[in-house]
Image (cartoon, helix red, strand yellow):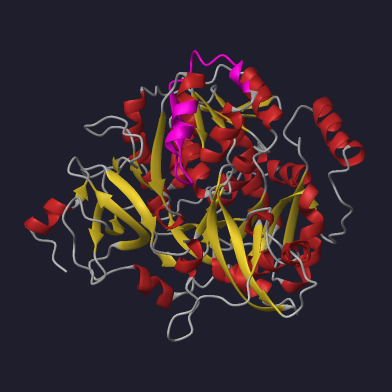
């Protein structure tokens, strides 16, 4: 493949980004906490901590890891937490100790957790008490040596902390009993860490910061190796693009209902913190009253969500009654934004939705619908962020002219090093020029904006989460009554897409309810097929391969 002048004319190439400002994520964090020490950093469940408090708490956790565990720089530490004040403190505490963060989806099943923890060779985990029983169940099957347990309101003032934690455990019954010999409560770990000052590690730009797990066409979760330089680059790239939103350092308040263990929310939060701004964390975005309550308590200026959430909120009367006077930017990512959702949001809030695009493997942002010559173009994913080159190729890898659809490929400082311990899988997703092949079919318009046309892969996106048919099918065929099956994505008003299973059975008595229950034992809830269709046979190619495309039609 060529990258000559003529070829470059067909590509979308943004201006370079200056990476010299920060050496690593630790540097980004320390600089923000020093520059904006007195500014509000995070608010959750009615309590706010400023940047100075956050830095102190992160330091205590760093010291605990260094002086009271056998963990060493480079060891993997899993974070199994919803959006709580503890999350940024323990993540940056681990990074300051030179360790690698492994974000874990609390919705994962037993099987999925065991795979991820073993694949990443996780040695320690920080987990919410509500989920500690799940860690107890998987612990014997993993190499985890240290478990740190936190409760919902651990970073709240003593009286409020006691009330919230008591209510969660004894009134709402949100904390199943657990027995984890040798575990330590986070507050106790913090007390130990407070005794001695931490030794702040300064990782090299090409040191690993995170293993962020994504699926694959085989359904096996793979760890995207994200370096400090990848995440720093993406924060700086987005900062540059977000100037088009009129964002001011230290003056904004972002509402973030999306989970920080998802790379989209993590990077948005990093961007906001890097610029000294304030983030309101929502532990459970499905609880719309709690989202509205949190928004009603603050003069918010930014909102980050996805299509599913926009639709739900715009149909909620209490949300419509909020004061949107100060809202200047709404960011969409994680799944495709529909025109109807964007229109409804604008009608309710008076604010446009700016859609971006990216993948776990690209830390994640590749394009943003702001800062381009054409302003915000609904229906497109915008233009590439600084330092990013995008091209569209045909099946032979030849770069296509603008206006033609092909596979979107990306190159830039935010693109991952590769997949953890999977050199063959890594080689498959990079072309000879070093471009990452996204698997998405796109068009680069004449004005440089991009449109996603379709997905080359069979991946299904459910409320922003990736579901891979092969993984679901592998579970389904374990049922004794299932002869064969195929899973495809179908449109869904709430989640964007939903898994639908086409099943051939050998027992007419088996029904959808039974198969759903069976799947729930091995799959996260969002991966379980929502719809089932029973057939006598499945469409197949000459060589016997099931034709999913025929099932979608």
- Residue 173, horizontal then vertical, whole percent: 88, 43
Taking the image as shown, residue 224 lies to the left or right of residue 136, namely left
Residue at image point 65% right, 21% down:
317
- Of the pair 523 and 411, the residue shown nearer to us: 523
334 in the magenta segment: yes
Residue at image point 21% right, 55% down:
404
Quarter of the rendering containing residue 474: bottom right
39 in the magenta segment: no
Quarter of the rendering containing residue 530: bottom right
- Residue 463, horizontal then vertical, whole percent: 56, 47
- Residue 547, horizontal then vertical, whole percent: 47, 73
- Of the pair 184 and 389, the residue shown nearer to us: 389
* Magenta residue span: 319-344
Work out which residue is located at the far right of the displayed protein and give it: 170
Taking the image as shown, residue 75 lies to the left or right of residue 458, namely right
Taking the image as shown, residue 324 lies to the left or right of residue 525, namely left
Q: Quadrant of the N terminus?
A: bottom left
Q: Is residue 349 visible?
A: yes
Residue at image point 21% right, 48% down:
12
Work out which residue is located at the far left of the displayed protein and give it: 5
């Amino acid at each position: 493949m060529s990258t000559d002048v003529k070829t470059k004319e067909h590509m979308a190439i943004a201006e370079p980004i200056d990476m010299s400002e920060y050496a690593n994520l630790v540097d980004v964090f320390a600089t923000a906490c020093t520059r904006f020490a007195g500014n509000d950093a995070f608010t959750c469940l009615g309590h706010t901590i400023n940047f100075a408090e956050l830095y102190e708490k992160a330091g205590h956790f760093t010291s605990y890891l260094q002086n009271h565990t056998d963990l060493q720089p480079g060891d993997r530490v899993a974070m199994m937490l919803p959006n709580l004040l503890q999350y940024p403190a323990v993540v940056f505490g681990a990074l300051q100790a030179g360790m690698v963060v492994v974000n874990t989806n609390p919705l994962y099943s037993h099987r999925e957790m065991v795979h991820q923890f073993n694949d990443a060779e996780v040695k320690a985990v920080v987990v919410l008490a509500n989920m500690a029983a799940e860690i107890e169940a998987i612990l014997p099957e993993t190499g985890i040596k240290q478990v740190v347990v936190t409760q919902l309101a651990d970073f709240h003032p003593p009286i409020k902390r006691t009330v919230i934690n008591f209510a969660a455990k004894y009134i709402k019954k949100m904390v199943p009993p657990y027995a984890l010999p040798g575990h330590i409560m986070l507050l106790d770990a913090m007390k130990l860490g407070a005794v001695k000052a931490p030794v702040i590690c300064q990782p090299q730009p090409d040191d690993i910061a995170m293993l962020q797990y994504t699926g694959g066409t085989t359904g096996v979760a793979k760890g995207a190796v994200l370096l400090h330089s990848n995440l720093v680059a993406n924060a700086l790239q987005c900062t540059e693009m977000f100037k088009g939103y009129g964002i001011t350092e230290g003056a904004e308040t972002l509402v973030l209902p999306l989970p920080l263990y998802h790379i989209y929310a993590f990077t948005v939060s990093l961007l906001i913190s890097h610029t000294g701004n304030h983030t309101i964390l929502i532990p459970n975005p499905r609880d719309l009253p709690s989202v509205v309550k949190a928004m009603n308590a603050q003069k918010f200026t930014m909102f980050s969500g996805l299509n599913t959430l926009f639709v739900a909120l715009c149909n909620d009367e209490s949300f419509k009654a909020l004061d949107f006077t100060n809202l200047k930017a709404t960011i969409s990512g994680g799944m495709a934004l529909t025109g109807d959702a964007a229109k409804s949001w604008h009608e309710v809030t008076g604010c446009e939705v700016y859609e971006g695009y990216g993948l776990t493997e690209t830390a994640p942002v590749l394009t943003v619908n702001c800062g381009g010559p054409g302003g915000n173009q609904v229906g497109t994913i915008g233009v590439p962020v600084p330092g990013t080159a995008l091209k569209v190729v045909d099946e032979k890898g030849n770069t296509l002219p603008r206006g033609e659809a092909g596979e979107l490929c990306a190159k830039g400082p935010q693109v991952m090093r590769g997949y953890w311990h999977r050199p063959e899988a890594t080689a498959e997703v990079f072309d000879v020029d070093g471009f990452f092949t996204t698997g998405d079919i796109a068009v680069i318009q004449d004005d440089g904006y991009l449109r996603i046309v379709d997905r080359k892969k069979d991946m299904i996106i459910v409320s922003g989460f990736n579901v891979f048919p092969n993984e679901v099918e592998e579970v389904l065929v374990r049922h004794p009554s299932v002869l064969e099956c195929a899973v495809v994505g179908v449109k869904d008003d709430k989640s964007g897409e939903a898994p639908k299973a086409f099943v051939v059975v050998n027992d007419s008595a088996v029904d959808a309810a039974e198969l759903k229950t069976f799947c729930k034992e091995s799959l996260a809830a969002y991966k379980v097929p929502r719809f089932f269709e029973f057939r006598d046979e499945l469409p197949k190619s000459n060589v016997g391969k099931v034709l999913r495309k025929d099932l979608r039609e």
